[in-house]
Amino acid sequence: MIKRYGDTDFVTGLRAIAACMVIAIHTGAFRDLGWIGANITDMGRTGVYAFFVIAGFSVAATFRQGQDFPVYITRRFFRIAPLYFLVVIAAFLFIRQGVIETPSWGERFDTPYDAYNLLMHLTFLSFLDYRIANSILTVEWTLPIEVFWYFALPGVILFARSWVLLAIACALVMALSELTWPVIRSVAPGADKLAAHWMPTRYGFYFVAGVACFRFRKSRLFDNVALTRVLLLAGAGLFVVAVAFSVGNGPLLVGLSTAIVICGYRISSPAWKSLLENRVLLFLGTISYGLYLTHPLLIALSVSQLGWHPSGLSGFAAALATSTLVSWILFLGLERPINNYFRDRKRTAAPVILKP
């Protein structure tokens, strides 16, 4: 049941933490526990940035396994598309039929729930229209961003053959991020500023940071145990400070802390292994994609059918428990069979070795 990745099992634990952070903000999990609890709850929104860094790391790892681009992109697409299609279509139909209320972003922009809306979501192009980009699940805006970078990152990986070129790639994607809103504003003067927020170009740094993590772990720098221990402590400390005290640029700090932990984590530390590789986190991390996608729909169903919005610690526990059950069923019935199919195809296919 639990996915195993050898010396990077801890990344599955990081996925679990990121998913729980997102559920926390949607349930106001710790808001009643004083100002630190409120900070932790509010910083749950930054869980998606941890996911972006992890996605960049995963793309670098899978693309460098020696597959050609069509094989790589097919595997990545079918890793996320089936469950995404299922949950988005279900939520779309529930909204159309009045089973659940129109999500907040849909109300803000008076979004029509028509064939155009659904088609833009199913083609992962919803980021092109800010009125519909986050109108169905309130978390789906991140999936088109991931798909965009699934296509773009292989070019970055092949370009960044040295640390200097990787630094140049980071600088370019950061510049692209800063230019996103000015470009949109010049092309469409009446656009809402959220048009930039949903755009994939705003988040390139996090994905490229994930690529840098992969490069670091493959380099001789990883053999320096003292350095990796310092990195691990620094990354964990930065995460705690950013989340508990809500200082500075939260998304950037959480993204950086995730990247630093990935660079510095070593299995040789039993304490850290028990923290990030315990069976609970590994289980939740294995089904984290389902947790992320299904919990908003389950919360909406609870509100509309039971008249109860899960909130506080009890609401967080209820939302986590129900989405865990649903995600586990979907993992066994949908995600795992598809993943196994493409893994078996990989074993029988002759790999095309990419030049470093």
Image: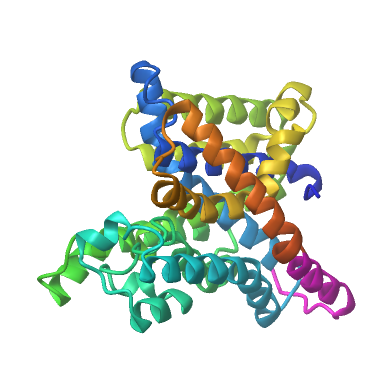
User: Image quadrant of residue 173?
Assistant: bottom left
- Picture quarter containing residue 253? top left
- Residue 261 is at least partly visible in this image: yes
Classify residue 293 as left or right of residue 59. Answer: left
Report the span colored magenta. Answer: 337-356
Q: How is the image coloured?
A: rainbow
**Which residue appears at 42% of the width and 59% of the height?**
137
Please name whichever residue, 269 or 17, is drawn nearer the observer in this view of the structure.
17
Does residue 67 sit above or below 12 in this rendering? below
Does residue 312 lie above or below 182 as drawn? above
Q: In this view of the protein, which residue sits in the foreground, 288 or 58?
A: 288
Residue under the point 48% across and 64% down? 143
Quarter holding residue 275: top right
Q: Position of residue 84 (x, y in %)?
A: 55, 67
> What percent of the width, then of the height, locates residue 170?
44, 56
Q: Nearer the viewer, residue 4 or 232?
A: 4
Q: Percent x, y for residue 252?
A: 39, 42
Q: Is residue 355 magenta?
A: yes
Q: Tell me which residue sits at (51%, 58%) in the image.
A: 166
User: Residue 127: image x %, image y %?
Assistant: 35, 70
Report the quarter where the C terminus lies.
Answer: bottom right
Q: Residue furthest left?
A: 189
Q: Is residue 303 left or right of residue 226?
A: left
Is residue 252 visible in this depiction of the protein?
no
Residue 171 belongs to magenta span: no
Query: In this view, which residue lies farthest toward the right?
Result: 348
Main SS class of the magenta portion in the image: helix
